[in-house]
Amino acid sequence: MTFAKVILGGTLGQSETWSCGLAFRHSTERVTPWPQNELQDAALRIAAIVPGGDIKQAPSTAVRSTLVRVEQRQDDGVLTAAAEAAWTQLGSSGAGATKPPQTAIVFSLRTGIPGARRRGRIYWPALAATIDATSLRLTSTATTAYATQMAAYLDKIETALKEAIDPSPSLNDFSLAVYSPTDRVCTDVRMIMVGDVLDVQRRRRDKIPEAYASHSYP
């Protein structure tokens, strides 16, 4: 089995970085390296996709997208080939940041099979996401929009991979999946869920250098 790993990455403010990795199962058992020009075409196609309005605006103008990386990996996770392209879809418009850099909308990827090895998550920057002033949660309208737009965005990435690596008339395809390195298997995603509570991606906080103020005591 072989699968595509798509990594979307960028910057948060002046000193922090962010990224999210996505797995797409390839419907063929082909294990030979994909031609470099096909991988490069896939990266360029993905970089050109414009995310839906709400998921594009939620990161804020303080968040920049900088890079798309497309990797071919075998079922044991070993990297076979890779290509990269500049990515500039986020940060060019929208509201300024109103939340700390580790703030994220969590998209849960469900396969319909129980167990942690069959579930995945996407942490999407949410420095400008709007919350209800009373409940301090995302509204149901917002969560519905985020889920719908992320599903559409990921579907377009599937299409970009297909058109670059296995275009028609080939019947081979790519499907959004959850990859388990323990079981060495990709399981297709059947549902994308968004909760109404903003979460944090802890590793972002760990990497941020701090400036301190002090005062003598007493």
Image: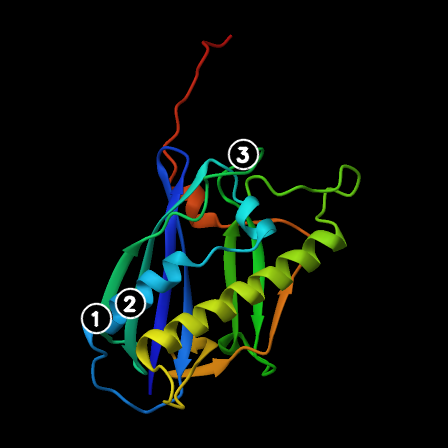
CA distance separating discs 1 and 3 = 38 Å
Name the image quarter holding the N terminus: bottom left
Is 57 situated above or below 72? above
Give x and y (percent) for residue 59. 52, 44
Q: How many numbered marks appear?
A: 3
Residue 217 seen from this side: yes
Which numbered marker is on residue 41? 2
Give x and y (percent) for residue 47. 37, 57
Which numbered marker is on residue 85? none
Q: How would you rate the neighbour count of disc 1 (Cα within 10 Å): few for under 14, some for 14-19, many for 20 or more?
A: few
Give x and y (percent) for residue 26. 38, 83
Asked if residue 140 lies left or right of residue 44, the reply is: right
Q: Earlier in the sequence, mark 1 or mark 3?
A: 1
Q: How would you rate the neighbour count of disc 2 (Cα within 10 Å): few for under 14, some for 14-19, many for 20 or more?
A: many
Which residue corresponds to the image point at 58% horizontal and 39% vertical from the top-left? Answer: 128
Q: Secondary structure at mark 2?
A: helix
Rendered image quadrant of residue 46: bottom left
CA distance separating discs 3 and 2 = 33 Å
Three-letter code, disc 1? Asn
Is 65 situated above or below 145? above
Asked whether the residues under the numbered discs 2 and 1 touch, taking CB atoms below 8 Å apart as contact, a structural biologist would say yes
Q: Nearer the viewer, mark 1 or mark 3?
A: 1
Q: Which residue is mark 3?
A: 97
Q: Earlier in the sequence, mark 3 or mark 2?
A: 2
Q: Secondary structure at mark 3?
A: loop
Q: Which is nearer the eye, 135 or 64?
A: 64
Q: Which residue is mark 1?
A: 37
